[in-house]
Amino acid sequence: MPCAAFLALLAQSTPFVLDPAALPGVRTTCGARDKRFIVEVDGGGLALADFDGDGDLDLVVVDGSTLERVQKGEPGLPTRLFLNDGSGRFAPAPEAWSIPPSRWGMGCAVGDVDGDGWLDLYVTHWGRDQLLRNREGKGFEARELACLAGEERWGTSAAFLDFDRDGALDLAVLNYLTFELGKVPPPGGDCRWKGHDVMCGPQGLAAEHDWLLRNQGDGTFSDATAAAKFAPASAAFALGCVTLDYDLDGDTDLYVANDSTPNFLWENQGDGTFREVGLQRGVSHDMNGKEQAGMGIAVGDIDGDRREDLLVTNFSGENNALYMSRGARGFVERSGPAGIGGPSIARLGWGTALADFDLDGRLDGFALNGHVYPQADSPGTDTSYAQPADFYRGLPEGRFAVEPLVDGAPRVLRASTVGDIDGDGDLDLVALELDGEVLVLRNRARTPASEAGPQWLRVELRSPGKNRFALGARVSAKWVGGQRAVEVRTSGGYQSSVPPEVHFGLGAATKVERLEVLWPSGRTSTLENVEGNRVLRIEEPRS
Amino acid sequence: MKLALVLWAALALALSSSAQSNEERAAALTFDPARLPRAAEGHWSAWKPSDELPLSVRDSMGVALAAYRESDYAAALVHLHGVLAREPDFPAALYQLGVTHFRLRRYGDGAKAFERFLAAAPGELGATQGLAHCYYSLGDYPRAQAHYERVLAVAAASAEAWRGLGLALLRQGDAQGGLARLDRALELKPDHADALAWRAQALFDLGRPGEALVPLLRSIELAPHEPRPWFLLAQVQSELGREEEAERARTQFRELGALEQEVRAQEGLLLYDPRAIEPLVRLLKLHRASRNSGELRDTLARALRITPLPLELAVEALDSADALGQRDVAVRLAADLEQRFSNTRAAWECLARHFAVVGDAARARQARERAAQL
């Protein structure tokens, strides 16, 4: 099929189809279906990464628990790894990869903590978090972090970043709120929403401070929260986070979506400390100056100005916020002009990402939706419990068309992760349905057999130091008809992790004219006339 | 029709004091208005807003209106549902149902009620504008725009419709178009604080921060307790490179924003239970602390609808009346407090404050002594 015709076809329909055979019958549990307590509504986490080193993306599913199990003192349901057979089909990993259960799993983050070239896994819990060291692609070894001994907070999202630029990956862990069974009241009383009795929280419950853990260079961590000034005056209900160098000063900053409280932008001061500048940089509130209930975060250079923009999914009755970057000056909220503000008001969004899913050279996005209150199906709520997921098809001039992500069916979705699971060059999606299945959404922008069709380039970076996967590196690509800059990260979305690589859709262009890499070390690499439709691995020059 | 409704509302005030039971109110809130019976097509085609109310619904409409005016929206729904069960699609009740749902922030139901009303009374301005407000709140900006335009086609002097149209355009990314409509709103109503703030937003969006300052500062002057203009002012000053001024605006925004958040939370509780004591007490405290006399006056009026006043609300009401300089109200509240709560320390402490405010030093001293004895 001629390329232009293929692109035209793509423009007419969502690129995703459900693939039930990719991960049959894998479900998660998050409490009971009546959702009487807030711990039952957030769902688990997902991660895509190549853990066994065979060149394809494996899948981690973080599972939850039930209040009955907790009351009986039983552990939660275990986090599971599923290995990819190379075609995008997943099977349970052998026993060596088993992960001992903790109390109630929430989210996860992926990074190489010891610089051995193998990706490790951090799992957050309501309860004790876990670090799973990857034994050179042969299995996980569970460790508790000594610096968090005895800590049993409610962790949500986490992010690996080298905040102090010592070459080793540090870890930011978000915590939500203090939840103690028996102390949180049941639905009713002041816990009302739109006239209906609902579960209590987060308002009225105590928010928890987040953690910043410094890698001591050997994969062990110390608590650097206070020393790095990573503590705001008031704790917030943190749910989503993403690393980015928003001010392009060469160090990694951190953006945090907080539930019902202003979002944080932690600006790295370059001296091992942070300063919270969310309000100053225009990313703490909506354009009305109202704090929103932030859930997930997507990041991407929407307008091709080589600065990454932010998309935050929010509660129903609030629009998803699109913060367009103006570099060091911060951001301006543009969800209305972009076309996603109004349509998102009826939705409660969670997992999200910005990427060129249809490979037309423009960034697209999506938001997984689903309410926290089953009572959302009652009259007068202007929303519903199960909701369709939205695909944001990228249009010229930073606008998006809002379409059904897959089949338009309403679901109660939560976490998502994105990656090319079948190696065909387009980005697939995995979505977690609350108390339901883990769904694999296959991207049909390309098929493994197709030679024609839109073009793409995937870039993997490798550094000689401890940050082997070059998290924080910045890759800029310019091709006929477009340009874009992307940072290498594994954070983003909601309680989830993505592969440490960058991906460009090139539309009809067959090559990238110029590809620049700014490594975390400050070194640069420049390549010209890079052929598309391939995975390009770039090694950091040693000098 | 308006006069008739007012008369019946006055008559119904007495009736409404026998408030609906909690069960009835809760049932009204969980009732899906889509289940209300429909009239045969064309049944109300001859209806005019000036028509007398049908006898069958006259009392219920009056009580519904009275409840609405007392901010008891759930009770209003109970009666409106009753009216519409007896007289399906009765337009006046549908209109009031739309307004009540809007107040309850149930915009979808509000929109449906206005749509049904407009089927009987096409082009009626109040409902068309109500429908536009509902669509706007639901995020359906194109439909909001269309309905504001319909209002303006008939009533070009409606500042509120020009403002709504301006906002709907701004939300769709048309800052220039939004600015032009907001300018029309301000020609008609130059001191519209919200329109001024949005005009500033449009100018800021258009990359004209210097011009945004004038309307923004005027908006702040008119509505000093609104956090949003301060939020925008911080952005504008920052854009103009005046970081010190921007930081001052942020500080003000943080204070007002925190206050507004708590006010919203308490108002949210009162929305469904207008006689809840704790939120009223908290609101009186908040508005008094922020010296927001307009809101304090309104909240005090709401509090005084509760009879008899429980101690904590009576104390807060007296302090508020004194703060507002409402001497007659304060004297009445002080007498009530002295009569009903003479054995409580909190009452005498409050009375001591009151007598000090009115300059009666002797009685203030006596009150302090009584408090100390308890």
Image (tube, coloured by chain):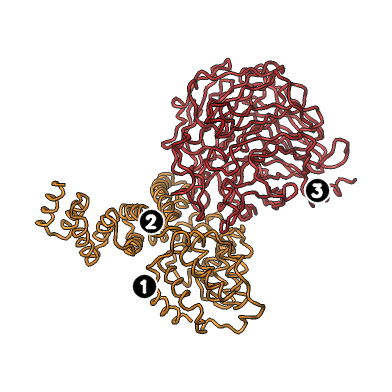
Chain colours: A red, B orange
User: Is residue A148 visible from the viewing direction of this image?
Assistant: yes
State the image coordinates of residue A34 (x, y, percent, origin top left).
58, 44
Left/right of residue B247 with respect to residue B143 in the rendered view: left
**Mark 2 highlights which residue?**
B276
Q: Quadrant of residue A22?
A: top right
Which residue is located at x 57 percent, y 37 percent?
A240
Q: Are marks 3 and 2 on the same chain?
A: no
Whether labels 3 and 1 belong to a single chain: the reply is no
Q: Residues within 10 Å of mark 1 (few under 14, many from 20)?
A: few
Q: Secondary structure at mark 2?
A: loop
The residue shown at (80%, 48%) is: A10
Kindly identify which chain the residue marked by label 1 belongs to: B
In the image, farthest residue toward the right: A1
Secondary structure under tag 3 reads helix
**Structural distance between the alpha carbons of marks 3 and 2:** 56 Å
User: How far apart are labels 3 and 1 at the CA level?
Assistant: 66 Å
Q: Is residue A143 above or below residue B249?
A: above
Q: Amino acid at mark 3?
A: Leu
| Disc sitting over residue A322 in the figure | none
The amino acid marked with disc number 2 is Ala
Find residue A39 and report its horizontal and vertical position in percent.
54, 37
Q: Residue at the spot x=37%, y=68% of the render?
A: B17
Coordinates of residue B132 in the picture (x, y in percent): 57, 67
How many other residues sit within 10 Å of disc 2, few (<14), some (14-19) or many (≥20)? some
SS at mark 1 in the image: helix
Q: Which mark is residue B14?
A: 1
